[in-house]
Image (cartoon, rainbow, N blue to C red):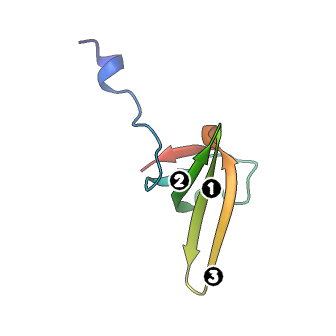
Amino acid sequence: MPQTLAMAQAPILPGTTVVVRDVCSIYNGYRGFVQRISGSRAAVLFEGGNWDKLITMPLRQLEPV
């Protein structure tokens, strides 16, 4: 088995912990939980101290942890 297939990124599914990887986003580097997926977008729940925020963003901006 070639190493490129073994190193393939895990799929992003509901319940997956992800980090935002988009330098143009104010959420760059934030860690959250995928709540649902619709097409090429995911609803990600960010929790931080005294606030919770549910943001919909493109899957291409997300990286599984």
State the residue position of label 1: 43
**Residue in the image at 55% along x and 84% along y:** 49
Q: Are marks 1 and 3 in contact (CB under 8 Å)?
A: no
Image x and y of residue 34, in percent: 52, 56
Residue placed under numbered mark 2 in the picture: 19
Residue tagged by mark 3?
A: 51
65 w.r.t. 48: above or below: above
- Density class for disc 3 (Cα within 10 Å; few <14, some 14-19, many ≥20) is few
Q: Earlier in the sequence, mark 1 or mark 3?
A: 1
Determine the secondary structure under disc 1. Answer: strand
Mark 1: few, some, or many residues within 10 Å (few <14, many ≥20)? Answer: many
Nearer to us of marks 1 and 2 is 1
Of 26 and 58, nearer the camera is 58
Residue situated furthest left in the rendering: 1
Contact, mark 3 vs mark 2 (Cβ under 8 Å): no
Q: For marks 1 and 2, give the CA distance.
A: 13 Å
Q: Amino acid at mark 3?
A: Trp
